[in-house]
Image (cartoon, helix red, strand yellow):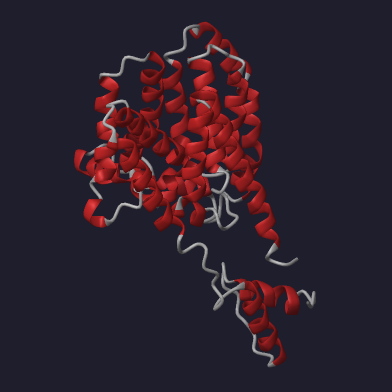
Amino acid sequence: MDPVGAIYLNIIVNLFNFIAIFFVTKRIYGNKTALFVSFIYATNKYLIEINRTAWNVSPIPGVSALIFFSIYKIVYENNYKWIFILSSLTGLFFHLHFSVVFLPLIILLSLILAKNKRKVLIYGLVSLPLLIIWFIPSVLYEFQSKNTNTNLFNNFLKDYFIKGFHLRFFLFRIHDAFIQFQMILSLPRTFNFLKFIVPGIYLITLIFEKVKKQKLLGYLILLWFIVPAFGYSFYGGTTSEYYMLMNSLLVIYVVYYLQTKLIKLKFKPTIYLLIIFWSIFTYYQTKDLWIKNINNGLVKQKQEVMENIRQNNKIAFDEGNIKAYLWQIWVEDKKVK
């Protein structure tokens, strides 16, 4: 009953993310790339901080990586049995965040490149139960809460398709589709425009790309940004940067691809400049994370709650406030430390 218990679940979830990302990158790009990508993922300040707390979006990076890999296996390697895994993972994603609404179109536009479309259709129809079964708890919940404000599906529909498509609103929302470039690269407001420049350079480079695999990967990667860019232009509700957390790994893939192109220019100082850049970048990404917060740690907060109990000073419930949870457990539920 101690709130610290959630940390152990979060450790498991983050291990899953790390292993999934390493596995997927290794199978697509190779060992060296997997090590580099995993290192950038593991030391990125934004990705560390957003995954510090156990919450519904924590498994998104790992699940998204496996979904992308499933699409890759189907389209590039013609392994159509992965459609069953793809259906299951898409159903699982439905329970993580509503940004899953973009996945069906991303998957459809990806599978257009599959060689045997007849097999894709047959395997897709057969695998539908693996997708639908994930909806059963949600459907039951929606029926039970249809007369309350907690009906998530109805609340979502109220904000979707309410405006239609407008170019001005599309230009406003396009910021959301590429925001992970800003977050992962820690771009300051002054250089905010780079979140469009980097994928723009990536797109231009792909036009001249001669390797078929890289062109295919480029198409699959860009879909994960382009589809939400149009999708969010129909959404009138509020958004946050974690709405696009599913693209976090793909941002690193884009950066890595552009880096390999720089190295292939055979400009000798490039390697040294990249080493210096990533060393400085990693230092600034991690320097604050090694310092333990002694002013508001768990031990001190427990001591403060115990002091409130001794003085009979009630701590009112406040969602997300660990002191309120400890008061509930130790006083209201009589599970005293």
Left or right: residue 92 versus residue 222 is right
54 lies above or below 89: below
Q: Residue at x 65, y 71 (%)?
A: 325
Q: Residue at x 70, y 87 (%)?
A: 309
Q: State the residue in front, 151 or 41.
A: 41
Name the outermost residue toward the front: 268
Q: Where does residue 106 sit, x and y in percent of width and height?
A: 43, 27
Q: Where does residue 143 sit, x and y in percent of width and height?
A: 61, 44
Whether residue 238 appears in this view of the structure is no
Q: Where does residue 118 sit, x and y in percent of width and height?
A: 52, 6
Q: Where does residue 175 sit, x and y in percent of width and height?
A: 29, 45
84 lies above or below 275: above
Q: How many marks?
A: 0
Name the outermost residue toward the bottom: 311
Q: Residue at x 67, y 48 (%)?
A: 12
108 lies above or below 55: above
Whether residue 61 appears in this view of the structure is yes
Occupied quadrant, residue 256:
top left
Q: State the residue in front, 293 or 227.
A: 293
Q: State the residue in front, 148 or 201.
A: 201
Left or right: residue 308 versus residue 22 is right
Q: Quadrant of the C terminus?
A: bottom right
Name the outermost residue toward the left: 168
Q: Quadrant of the N terminus?
A: bottom right
Occupied quadrant, residue 21:
top right
Occupied quadrant, residue 224:
top left
226 lies above or below 155: above
